[in-house]
Amino acid sequence: DAGVTQSPTHLIKTRGQQVTLRCSPKSGHDTVSWYQQALGQGPQFIFQYYEEEERQRGNFPDRFSGHQFPNYSSELNVNALLLGDSALYLCASSLGGTQNTGELFFGEGSRLTVL
Amino acid sequence: GDSVTQMEGPVTLSEEAFLTINCTYTATGYPSLFWYVQYPGEGLQLLLKATKADDKGSNKGFEATYRKETTSFHLEKGSVQVSDSAVYFCALTGPYGGATNKLIFGTGTLLAVQP
C-alpha cells in the first residue's frame, strides 16, 4: 500500500519564478493538505483540498494556490517566488467527511530552494 | 488563536535515560492532541495521539497523557535508544468528525541520544 508520495524531492528556483509541487495521497484517502516547514520550525498549514475544492486556508498570500484532481491527487503552485519561500513543503492526506479520524499521513516533502 | 508551545532543544541524553519533552497548548473547545516524529531525511510520522481529557496515547515505549486541567501533553519514555534521535513535534487539531484536520504544530524539539 503506497503511502503519500511527493515530487519533486528537491528543486532550485530563482526569485520571481513559479513552481508546481505534486502530491499523491495514500490509497483510499480523499483529502489533501499542504504545509510549509521552514528550517528549524514546525510545519505551517497552507490549505486543504476536499472534493476538488479548497476547504480551509491558512495565513498565506494568494501567490500560493492549489488544485485537487478527480483522482484526489493535488498540486501546490507558488508564483513570484521570494527568498522566504525556501522551505520543505509537506503534503498530508487523510479521510474527509464522516470518516475523518483526525489523523494525517505525511509525505517526505519537496525541498524548495529559492536563490 | 490556538497554539502549541513545546520545550526548546536540543535535548541530549545518554542511552537508557528517561525522556520528558514538555508540551502545553492553548485552544478553544476540546482539541485532539498529537505527537509527530521526524527522523533525519524523512517526513513526519504520527507517534501517538489522544482525543479527550485523561486519555493516554502510547506507541513504541513513548507515552503522553492529555491533561485538560494543565493544558499539557508531555511526551515521556522510560529508556531512550540511539534510534530515537529525531525531531519531535507536538500538535493539536479540532475535535474530529467533519472537521478539517488542520494541525497546529509546535516548533519541534530535537532529541539526540548518545551511546
Image: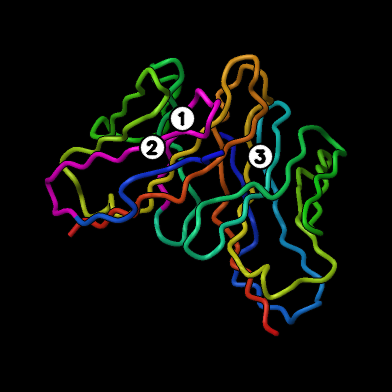
Which stretch is magenta?
A: A13-37
Q: Are marks 1 and 2 on the same chain?
A: yes
The residue tagged 1 is A32
Q: In the picture, which quadrant includes the N terminus of chain B?
A: top right
Q: In the picture, which quadrant includes the C terminus of chain B?
A: bottom right
Instruction: For marks 3 and 1, give the one nearer the viewer.
Output: 1
Residue A66 sits above or below residue B77 on the image: above
Chain for disc number 3: B
Identify the residue at horizontal 44%, vertical 40% (top origin).
A91
Asked if residue B85 is among those painted magenta in the image, a careful observer would answer: no
Q: Are marks 3 and 1 on the same chain?
A: no
Residue most extreme to the right: B54
Alpha carbon separation for disc pair 3 and 1? 25 Å
Amino acid beneath label 2: Cys
Residue A21 at x, y = what percent? Answer: 30, 40
Pick the front one: A75 or A60? A75
Residue most extreme to the bottom: B115
Amino acid beneath label 3: Thr
Residue A61 sits above or below residue B34 on the image: above
Residue A31 sits above or below residue B18 on the image: above
- Label 3: few (<14), some (14–19) or many (≥20) C-alpha neighbours in 10 Å: some
Alpha carbon separation for disc pair 1 and 2? 8 Å
The residue tagged 3 is B26
Helix, strand or loop status at disc 1: strand
Helix, strand or loop status at disc 2: strand
Residue A109 at x, y = what percent? Answer: 41, 49
In the displayed structure image, the side of residue A50 where residue B10 appears, left or right: right
Q: Which mark is residue A23?
A: 2
Identify the residue at horizontal 65%, vertical 73% (top origin).
B11
Pick the front one: A30 or B32? A30
Amino acid beneath label 1: Val
